Image: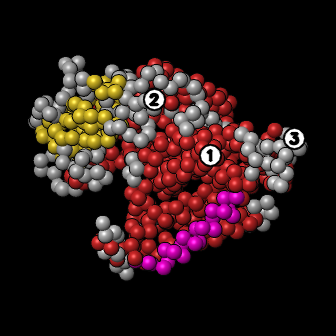
Amino acid sequence: MAQPINRYKADLRDYKFLLFEQFRIQDILGTGPFEDWDQDSVEMLMGEVYKWATEVLGPLHQVGDQGCKLSDGKVTTPPGFRDAWKALYDAGWAGLAVTSEYGGQDGPATLHTMAEEFLSGANTAFTMYPMLTLGVGEVIATHGTDEQKATLCGKLFDGTYGGTMCLTEPHAGSDVGANTTKATRLGDGRYKISGTKIYITGGDHDLSENIIHLVLARTPDAPAGTRGLSLFIVPRDRLDGSGSNDVSVGGIEHKMGINGSATCVLNFGENDDCIGELVGSEEQQGIRQMFHLMNLARIGVGIQGLAVASSAYLNALDYAKDRKQGSDIAHRKDSNAPRVPIIKHADVRRMLIDMKSKVEGIRALAMKLTMHNDHARIARDGGDEKAALYHEGQVDLLVPLLKAYATDQAFLICSTAIQVYGGAGYLKDWPVEQYCRDSKIFSIYEGTNHIQALDLVGRKLGQKGGMNYQAFAKDVHTFIAANKDNEAIRDGVASLSSAIEALTGTAMRFWGWLKDHKVDMVPLVANRFLEMMSETTIGWLLLEGAAIADKAAADLADGHPDKAFYQGRVYSAMFYAVDVLPGVAHKASLIAKEAREVLEIPEAAFATV
């Protein structure tokens, strides 16, 4: 059995830079909805959550890899998970951004996201249970009736109840509109639920007293497709204490990773006695209501990718500093030359800065998104409709980027981390192989990354007549104009200028395809476009940070502890700008070719076996 040991690492200096120097969260603290917060409390929180994550969750990461057990219809989580669940809610870390009305701390979404990165990085599988529970509480708090809020929200937010989202069915997969789970009216406001859901994260466990399932189902007279779906509150056990609600576990999946998270097959109404009630009071609002949870979950999954990638990078960095192998290339012909740490070797350094730049860039993207969320909340509370619409529009644009790019890169970064270790990285003695296994699911669940790409090009680009994208491009161009003569990052800014022009030109091409009846080209290149927009955004944010870091470094004496940090920020931004950003224009040129081989190849021509 694996021994409890923490391998999770995070660079707290990077968080402080993003929070207080680049995005200046202190400017929104102490006022409006965040009046009880200040910079000192944020810094204290950062240290406390990180310490808790490394001391409580980190040691359970490898332990949890042994998986969950199903016996007599009940799921048992790995050793230590129950105590960690209680400790999490006792500490209050799950409720940082929850309203004080339900016992939360009224914190900015940005702080919740930072804490979620620490928790997910320390133990991804465990953190999935409270992440979805929080989302279920938020859906009911937003869309539920007053009675539902009073009955359920407090217990979801304090961990008395767990929560799940139940969408996927065996025959449908990601085609949610093909779902057939039935909801039959009983005439008293209740519904009889019957059907099977698969891949349900936290579908059963021993962490909480009860579990509240949010179930998409269809009433008998509902129209076909997604518009006919309604969302139902279906507790595992009856809320009146009378026993089981006829929700049974058909099995738990045996997975490649995140084994401490129980992924269940759930059967509703096998004995024709499963009772649910509508979220709110109106049928056929299920997709709209569930998207509230799915957007939260997609941000959360992007944070999972970032968290695991960051720890994989930092572990690989430590190993590269310690592991000695080979001599310096300057002494390559001297067989007696001393062995040097592998960080001295050019290819290892290339892999390290590649990981560093992407981790720092994805974290900046995540914080940009959540700061838009926080500014939107302030604008709404202050009655500033124009500002609220701008910030909300940017959130809409950035969610698919964070979910897809962060998770695609997480798997690649974890793979690169293994490569830094060499053969040792393939062994369970080191944490990076588990990070790699855990990270693969991120690009698949909560909407595959192709679904994110289709959402971006098919819906988000054209929202409000394209005004959200235009506002995004304007922000990038404003930065370019202000920094095109900045000597420290001038070449990087030139690369960014080429990237945003190529990106906008490709977006215009999509609209042209729709007019020219070439709509079949859109899904073919959607993933490539999402990657282009993600790289442009991250390049912009890294260079923005580099401009701040370069100025700050100039004011410091050599040897100051922050000098190297700021220099590292500039180097990683410039590496990304010269190594990654030029690929945006190249990808645009590939899209412009309108190559149709993928669409035209006969199925029989793929292989003759």
Quadrant for residue 34, please give it.
Answer: top right
Name the one closer to the observer, 8 or 186.
Answer: 8
Q: Residue at x 50, y 30 (%)?
A: 62
Q: Residue 581: x, y in percent?
A: 63, 64
In the rendered structure, does residue 593 fall within the stretch colored magenta?
A: yes
Considering only order in the chain, which callout, 2 or 1, is on the residue closer to the N terminus? 2
Q: Residues within 10 Å of mark 3 (few under 14, many from 20)?
A: few
Q: Are marks 1 and 2 in contact (CB under 8 Å)?
A: no
Q: Which label sits on residue 559?
A: 3
Q: Residue at x 35, y 24 (%)?
A: 76
Q: What kind of residue is marked 2? A: Gly
Q: Which residue does the numbered mark 2 point to in the structure image?
A: 64
Name the one closer to the observer, 106 or 30.
Answer: 106
Considering only order in the chain, which callout, 3 or 1, is on the residue closer to the N terminus? 1
Label count reads: 3
In the rendered structure, does residue 251 fall within the stretch colored magenta?
A: no
Question: Magenta span covers which residues?
Answer: 575-596
Task: Determine the secondary structure under disc 2.
Answer: helix
Task: Determine the secondary structure under disc 3.
Answer: loop
Residue at the limit of the structure toward the front, as seen here: 335
